[in-house]
Each structure stands twice: as C-alpha cells, then as structure tokens.
Amino acid sequence: TRSGAVLRVPPLSKLLHESLAASYDVLDLPSEGRAAFLAEHGGDVVAIACTNSGRVDAELIGALPRLQVVVNQGVGYENVDVDACLERGILVSHTPDVLDDAVAETTLGLLIATRRRLVEADAFVRDGRWADGQFPLTGQVSGSRVGILGLGRIGRRIAGVLEALGCEISYHNRRRVPGVPYAYAGSPTELAAAVDNLVVVVPGGSATAALVDRDVLDALGPDGVLVNVARGSVVDEPALVAALQEGRLGAAGLDVYAEEPHVPQALRALGNVVLLPHVGSATVRTRTAMADLTLANLALWWESGRLQTPVPEMAALSS
Ligand code: NDP
C-alpha cells in the first residue's frame, strides 16, 4: 500500500475538499508562506488535487520530490504544467464527458439570451418601460447558421442541441471529424464568414491563444454573435471590446475572460453583451459528478497506479 499525503491546492469545492480528508492524509497549500510550507512538508506529498482555477506550475512540482499524480477537477487542464509532469513521469487526470450536458446547456442559454436580448428585455420590464412601448424586435437562433470552433466532446453536444432547433451547423478543428453531417471550414476566419453565430469551445493554452482575433470578429460582422464558453485566452479581448464598441460585431455572450475574475469595465459597460461568471459546468449534479470522477481517479491510482481518465498527453508515458 502507498503512503504519503494528498496536497489540496485551493480553490476546491467543499465536496472534494471534505471527501479527500475522509480517505487520505491531506495537506493544504497556503496562499502565504508557501516556500516555508513546502520546505517543511513538500517531501510528504505524493498526490495533488486541484481544479482548473489552481495553478500547478513547474515551481510547485519541483518542490515536491515524491509527487506522482495530479488529479484535476475540470476537463480543461492548462493550469497544470503537463510538460513538467511528463519529464518526471507524473500522471495527470481530468474530468471529460461528465460535464458535456451542463456546458452545452449553458452555451444554448447564452446564445439565446444574447440573440433574443433576454437580459435587456428583463430590465425593460423591471424598469417599468413596457408601458411606454414595445421592446424592439430581435434576431432568432432557430434556423440560423451556427459555426462551432472546436467540435470535440462538448462541441458535438452543442451541435446536437442546435440541430434540434433547425440550425445549420458548420465547424472548424485542426482536423476534420469523420462521419459528421456538418460542413468543414478550413480556418476560424472562414468559419466566421459563413455563419450568423460563432460558438467557441476549443481548449485553452498557448496553442489557441487569440485564435479568435480581429480578422475572425470582422468576418463574423455587425450582425454576428460570438459566444465564448472555452477560455478567455482564446479570444483577443481588447479586439473584442473594440469590435463591439464600434459596431463591427453585433453582440457577444461570454462565460470566460482573459483575467478572471476581472472583467474589463469597457466590457461591463456595453449593452450588447451577456456576461456569465464562468458557470459552464456549475450545476449541483455536474459538479458532483466531476468531484466523484476526480476522487475515482485518485482511488484507482492509489490502488493500482493507473488513472481512469488520464489527459491525452499521458499516452506518451505508456508507449
Ligand atoms: P475536446 O478535446 O473533446 O474538444 C476540443 C476540440 O477543439 C477538438 O475537436 C479539437 O480538434 C479542437 N481544437 C483543439 N485545438 C484547436 C486549434 N488550435 N484550432 C482549432 N480547433 C482546435 O474538449 P472538450 O469538448 O471536452 O472541452 C473543450 C474545452 O471547453 C475545454 O478544454 C475547456 O477549456 C472548455 N470548457 C469550458 C467550461 C466552462 O465552464 N466554460 C467547462 C468545460 C470545458 P483538433 O484536435 O482536430 O483541432
């Protein structure tokens, strides 16, 4: 049997935080006095539990000589320095699939709220403006052309939901997806030019930084809607703000931002945006499933040294 401690890297959900303590020796990474803490306890840590808001960088990994596994709650894991882990044979897991429904639902809600101006319409009623006249007519999602930038697990779920609304779906990935009935676009700009609404759901990290730039936004155009549920890093945020201010882009529905929880004042001041606080997967049912899968990975590793849902890069370790 294994011995050693599980390092809890904040923030963790209450469920994950407490469940870890029930089954393992735990340590908590402090926000202050970290160097002294690691000098004293770093040698005890064999596992890390984190969410994708907790950084597990090369410096932290380097201070943990016995670290063998990182279990991350969240499907995105750009918070973990996977290259540094690979160098030492440290395994990393994430939580794919279990959040697809919740994120697809958030995306649909954001797209409809933005296109139909539901948040503005709510304020119109609350502010007593209805008696002065009708709310303006809006666009419509049903039957529109939707481009999906990132037709992966979540993207395909979103496409399925939108198909039921009679939308015409097209997509861009680096590679074509075999066997799907959707049109492929050769670049993000080509995709944006062909659709009314662009949904962004690629992974974050350096490979997709500012993938949605001024060219893509201009291709989407003054009647276009951008919905970003991926990562703030994927969209050039200053270019987005400028396009919205200048009317070169119609509207945007956003769940993610460049520097969360900071949302630029210029964005918050705009009427043609719907802004959510990174709640794509944030339902009780889905967050419970994500915590359970994170714990299942740790339990399996503890028993057998294997992971249930390793990140794709781990394939390089077994080959
Ligand atoms: P998948 O890995 O299943 O899908 C990602 C898709 O993006 C793939 O189809 C991939 O295709 C495509 N892609 C990757 N890199 C590029 C690129 N450089 N250019 C174009 N396409 C690219 O991931 P999931 O669907 O499970 O999750 C997607 C992302 O959604 C997560 O990584 C996370 O960042 C975000 N997310 C956000 C949440 C929220 O709360 N807002 C919640 C959950 C996830 P190919 O490799 O062929 O390019």
Image (tube, rainbow, N blue to C red):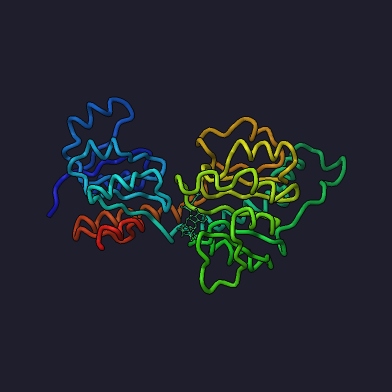
Compared to 192, does 135 lie above or below? above
- Is residue 283 in sight in this rendering? no
Residue 11, by quadrant, is top left
In the rendered structure, the answer to whether residue 235 lies left or right of residue 112 reads: left
The residue at 59%/32% (across/down) is 264
Outermost residue toward the right?
A: 133
The residue at 47%/51% (across/down) is 203
Residue 196, by quadrant, is bottom right
In the rendered structure, the answer to whether residue 107 lies left or right of residue 122 reads: left
The residue at 65%/37% (across/down) is 241
Compared to 157, does 131 lie above or below? above
Residue 218, given in percent of the width and then of the height, sits at 69, 46
Residue 187, given in percent of the width and then of the height, sits at 59, 56
Residue 283, given in percent of the width and then of the height, sits at 49, 52
Which quarter of the image is occupied by the C terminus? bottom left
- Which of 131/71 is in front? 71
Outermost residue toward the bottom?
A: 179
Outermost residue toward the front?
A: 186
The residue at 43%/50% (across/down) is 76
- Is residue 69 in sight in this rendering? yes
In the rendered structure, the answer to whether residue 102 lies left or right of residue 295 reads: right
Which quarter of the image is occupied by the N terminus? bottom left
Residue 25, given in percent of the width and then of the height, sits at 20, 43
